[in-house]
């Protein structure tokens, strides 16, 4: 029985070593199972019972504590560029048509290829959409329901066209003459 205590100690040390090396909450559950098996070996439990305890305790710890641990340890995790796109609004800069495989949107100043969530829907330029998911290198979008009632053509008249400095000076001189 003493050799089983050594075996379970080795399993415990290896599980903890892997956990320390990976820092990814990957094997700590097996360290808990090994600890219980060490106690069973000290109490002279049969080997089959030690093995069963190891697997049962490891699985129970994995199933019931991993979701809590992942949530706790990943709370300060910063989303990557792609992960941060989901849920954001975008403006369609090139008509989205899944049938022809075309579509472009701008999100946060970055231009992305896009496709519509609804296969048959064409989304015109200027529409406001929400990013639903990412498929490969394309954003999957759907029309923003709150902005659906806004006509993109009516917004064009509200935004002035960009002007060069010479155009602005000419406009000012014309205003001074009047």
Image (cartoon, rainbow, N blue to C red):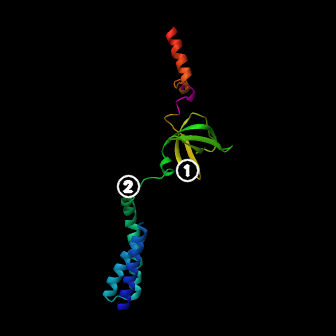
Horizontal and vertical percent for residue 151?
55, 28
Q: Which residue is mark 1?
A: 134
Neighbours of disc 2 within 10 Å: few (<14), some (14-19), many (20+) = few
Q: Residue at x 59, y 51 (%)?
A: 137
Number of the label disc, if any, that sits on residue 117: none
Q: Is residue 130 magenta?
A: no
Figure quadrant of residue 142: top right
Q: First in sequence: mark 1 or mark 2?
A: 2
Q: Residue at x 42, y 73 (%)?
A: 18
Give the residues drawn in magenta, as a range: 148-154
Q: Which residue is mark 2?
A: 76
Q: Is residue 31 visible?
A: yes
Q: Is residue 157 above or below residue 94?
A: above
Q: Residue at x 60, y 34 (%)?
A: 125
Going by the image, does 5 lie left or right of 141?
left
The residue furthest top is 178
* Nearer to the camera, 156 or 169: 169
């Amino acid at each position: 029985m003493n050799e089983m205590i050594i075996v379970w100690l080795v399993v415990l040390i290896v599980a903890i070593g892997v956990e320390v090396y990976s820092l990814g909450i990957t094997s700590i559950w097996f360290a808990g199972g090994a600890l219980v098996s060490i106690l069973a070996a000290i109490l002279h439990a049969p080997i089959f019972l030690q093995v069963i305890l190891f697997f049962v305790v490891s699985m129970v710890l994995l199933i019931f504590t991993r979701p809590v641990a992942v949530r706790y340890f990943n709370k300060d995790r910063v989303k990557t560029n792609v992960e941060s796109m989901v849920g954001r609004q975008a403006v369609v800069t090139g008509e989205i048509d899944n049938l022809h495989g075309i579509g472009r949107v701008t999100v946060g100043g970055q231009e992305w290829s896009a496709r519509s969530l609804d296969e048959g829907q064409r989304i015109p330029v200027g529409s406001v959409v929400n990013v639903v998911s990412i498929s490969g290198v394309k954003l999957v979008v759907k029309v923003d329901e709150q902005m659906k009632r806004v006509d993109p053509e009516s917004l064009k008249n509200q935004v002035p066209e960009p002007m060069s400095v010479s155009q602005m000076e000419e406009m000012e001189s014309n205003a001074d003459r009047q």
